[in-house]
Amino acid sequence: MVIPNVLSIAGTDPSGGAGIQADLKAFSAHRTFGMSAITAVVAQNTRGVRSFVSLDAAFVYDQIAAVFEDIRVDAVKIGMVANSEIALAIAKALDRYASCPVVLDPVMVAKSGHHLLDESAVAALRDELIPRSTVVTPNLPEARVLLGLERDIDSLEEMRERVAALRALGPQWVLLKGGHLTGETSLDILHGERTLEFAAPRVTTTNTHGTGCTLSASIAALLPQTGGTPDVVRSVQSAKDYLTEALRHADELTVGGGHGPVHHFYAMWNASTQIAASHVSVGAAS
Ligand SMILES: Nc1ncnc2c1ncn2[C@@H]1O[C@H](COP(=O)(O)OP(=O)(O)O)[C@@H](O)[C@H]1O
Ligand SMILES: Cc1ncc(COP(=O)(O)O)c(N)n1
């Protein structure tokens, strides 16, 4: 089987749980070859964002061009775009190069409350990047901004009402994420050719840094692995199952004093621990 090559266009997280770092881990966990074009370098950790430096838009374009002019790209994930110049440069690069599925996580505000997108860039994100996306994955505060609502979406019923207006912004599919609601399940609504609801048991953990990044990167990694035409429904279901398990295992990691990362490699590391253990016992017997 050809191993998919997947590109993340996003900002960084030196603490390793969100942004490009989370995307590359999620790509690897799904057996794809991960690549990255950086939009902004962010000083952040599990407690919050301190500051960030956006890269020059032409330089962001050049990073994307360098990848596409050499490498077959099977899917793109877009995260933090930082400002309207970078959003427009990404749109131009997608038009020039990308014939693969594009998953857009419209990152605006980190869980700590720090703005990762200039307010003046919302229009470029909405008008230039969302219509070029196969799947766009807003959380509830992002949906509020994109729809110009006066208050947050605060119930499942309201999520069901609003999802069509998000699709009307032009993507093929919308995955409206309900992680910010409370309740025993964490429910997301997928709306496109069909409408489906994906409910997962809500995991009791404070280690939720990078959940949105991990989910969108996982969808991008899975889309090229669903056979002929990328199957969005199956990719979203598998990505959500993977994220729920990664959240369930998050407390095995001991990273930072705030909201720690999810455990991207819970399945692989548990398997390799068993191999290491059997190797030791064989050695002991001889
Ligand atoms: N505690 C939790 N248990 C299970 N799933 C969760 C939990 N928190 C968030 N999720 C899921 O993680 C994904 C991203 O969640 P959300 O918090 O809505 O977005 P973001 O990370 O972009 O703010 C969604 O699929 C959501 O349902
Ligand atoms: C570079 C970057 N991109 C996205 C997020 C959002 O992640 P989260 O809201 O899950 O903390 C982040 N903190 N940093």
Image (cartoon, rainbow, N blue to C red):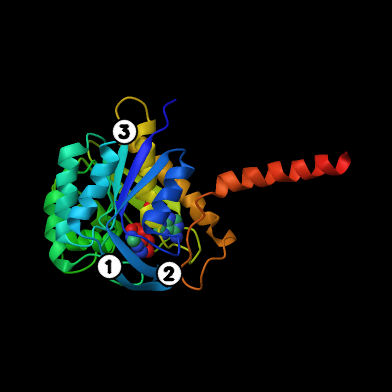
**Residue type, label 1:** Val
* Residue 159, x across and y down, in percent: 26, 55
Left or right, residue 240 beside residue 108 = right
Q: Position of residue 197 (x, y in %)?
A: 33, 45
* Lower position in the chain sequence, tag 3 or tag 2: 2
First in sequence: mark 1 or mark 3?
1
Circle 1 packing at 10 Å, graded few (<14), some (14-19), many (20+), is few
Quarter of the picture for ligand 2?
bottom left
Residue 186 visible somewhere in the drawing: no
Which quadrant is home to the C terminus? top right
Q: Nearer the viewer, mark 3 or mark 2?
A: 3
Q: Tell me the crowding category of disc 2: few under 14, some 14 to 19, or many 20 or more residues within 10 angstroms, Cα based.
A: many
Q: Which residue is mark 2?
A: 45
Q: Position of residue 58 (x, y in %)?
A: 18, 54
Q: Is mark 2 within 8 Å of ligand 2?
A: no
Precedes in sequence: disc 1 or disc 2? 2
- Which residue is painted at 42% across and 31% down in the image? 3
* Disc number lying in front (1 or 2): 1
Label 3 CA crowd tier, 10 Å (few <14, some 14–19, many 20+): few
Disc 2 secondary structure class: strand
Numbered-mark total: 3
* Residue bearing the label numbered 1: 53
* Near-viewer residue (263 or 184): 263
The residue drawn where x is 43% and y is 38% is 32
Q: Quarter-wise, where is residue 17 in the image? A: bottom left
Badge 3 marks a residue whose secondary structure is loop
* Residue 72 image label: 3
**Cα–Cα span, label 3 and label 2:** 33 Å
The answer for how far apart the CA atoms under marks 1 and 3 are is: 29 Å
At a point 22% along the width and 58% down the height, the residue shown is 143
